Amino acid sequence: MTQTPTEPGLGPDPLAFDLVVIGGGSGGVRAARIAAQHGARVALVEEYRLGGTCVIRGCVPKKLMVYASRFAQEFAEAEGFGWSVGPTRFDWPTLKARRDQEVARLEGVYRSNLVGAGVTLFEGRAVMQDAHRVRLADGRLLQATTVLIATGARPEAGADIPGAELAIDSNGFFELEQLPRRVVVQGAGYIALELACLLRLLGAEVTVLVRGPRILRGFDDAMCAHLQQELLATGLQFAFGRELASLSRSPANAQATGAGDSALQLVLDNGQTLVADCVLRAVGRSPNTAGLGLEAVGVQLDAKGAVQVDAQSRSSVAHIYAVGDVTNRVNLTPMAIREGHAFADSVFGKQLRTVDHTLVPSAVFTTPEAAMVGLTEAQALIQYPQLDVYRSTFRPMKATLSGHGARVFMQLLVDRASDRVLGFQMVGPDSGELVQLVAVTLQLGATKAAFDATLAVHPTAAEELVTMRTPAVRHNF
Ligand code: NDP
């Protein structure tokens, strides 16, 4: 690009900032705003839309769609309570338009908060020119005393199989103009299960391809087993131990399988064939560091491409920091926000803050939701051989009249020696809400005796939490 010295940042004198943030997602936006409030001259560069994955094509639009999907069950349940619900009809384009409108509104809020805090925004891709200069797509250079990499992560493509380009990832999911009738989802992590479940409740036939023997590997075994049963009851189908071998959209295949012209034919690794209108691959996410010029300036990346940082989020180059998914520590929005805030306070606010990456509560927004905080049973047993597992599965009160067969699962893991509660897992309505408060009690070091001493709130599902008296399992290693 030809540089004309009359434009700011072009020519020999770059625009100078105390902090240049690359990436306008949850972590980058928080860091930029707080650093500016501490008096720093801050620039933020974003190549797509402000808000990042969470706001634009992740948590927020997903949760709005989860809400939409749950009405299907609620209409059915209402009849048990005396309501007559006539024929219902769901319109995907209406939901998509309203969802996108809300996302645009939030993006505007992010923008005005940044501008209001005095942050200078640049649109387009940024790369490191050298250790202290960031080059924008139009050739302008930003001089940076400190650089923050907050570029997040992107969907992994998965194995490079024939026809891979016919599949979509979670970004493509948010672009769908219509509800696909038959869907195959590959993967069994947060994203695969949340999207599979909402599509199922909205009326699609959904098969989840799981390469291993179970969903949500690494999560608590008993919780996952319960969730799997609940998801099966929604009509979601699982194919365990299966990988995708190829995808095609040929009329010959369509004829042979009786599928329509637009249908996709899938071949699995055991030769089995499936037909779908949409194949969604949700097989993990990779840190967004490719082509940023980080290695050239000495920033060390790990094998997955994540920026390696210390407890202060500082990379191997002293003035270059990184927060959020690009560091592949705990890949959750609230953690990116916390890391970004701690970075800004530490570097520009004269308050050294580190982020605790333990005791992280989270929820999987399937229906029913699964939520957890602290250790799983398998993790707890490694450190605490005398482990008591308090576990309860029960029919929630609402189901007595609705006739819905769902059961709630609740589990507390307790170290018998100290009586400390080490972990909590739940599957059931509103478990994502409940786990937030249980996390506070674990943060305070709550004992089982404290749960027992707490009076129940009746009638609720949550009261089970303080009324579980006898361990279901007493480990004694
Ligand atoms: P996850 O790492 O959670 O899950 C990836 C899934 O894909 C696993 O089931 C994994 O199987 C499977 N997989 C990986 N590689 C392959 C392959 N080559 N072939 C077949 N299957 C494969 O990633 P997600 O993309 O679901 O989520 C990314 C991150 O986003 C999460 O870590 C989470 O932190 C965050 N997130 C949080 C949400 C929330 O808080 N509600 C919602 C959505 C995302 P296996 O188990 O065998 O490895």
Image: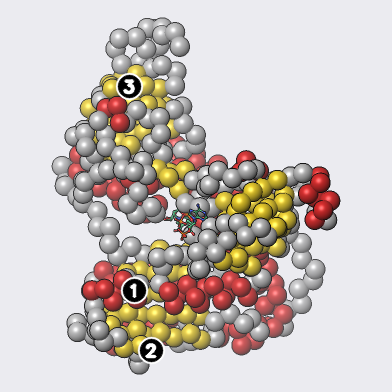
Q: Is residue 356 above or below residue 253?
A: below
274 relative position to 216: left or right: right
Quarter of the image for residue 223 reads bottom left
> Badge 1: how crowded within 10 Å, few (<14), some, or many (20+)?
few
Residue at (41, 39) in percent of width and height: 288
Query: Is residue 112 among the parts visible in the rendering?
Result: no
Residue holding disc 2: 472
Q: Nearer the viewer, residue 325 or 161?
A: 161
* Spatial separation of the CA atoms under disc 1 and disc 2: 15 Å
Instruction: Please tell me how many numbered marks the rendered image carries.
Output: 3
Amino acid marked by disc 1: Ala
Residue 372 rendering spot, x and y as whole percentages: 39, 69
Q: Amino acid at mark 2?
A: Ala
- Percent x, y of residue 120: 37, 28
Q: Which residue is mark 3?
A: 129
Q: Which residue is mark 1?
A: 378
Q: Earlier in the sequence, mark 3 or mark 1?
A: 3
Question: How many residues crowd mark 2 within 10 Å: few (<14), some (14–19), many (20+)?
Answer: few
Q: State the image quarter where residue 43 is shown.
A: top left
Q: Earlier in the sequence, mark 2 or mark 3?
A: 3
The tag earlier along the polypeptide, 1 or 2, is: 1
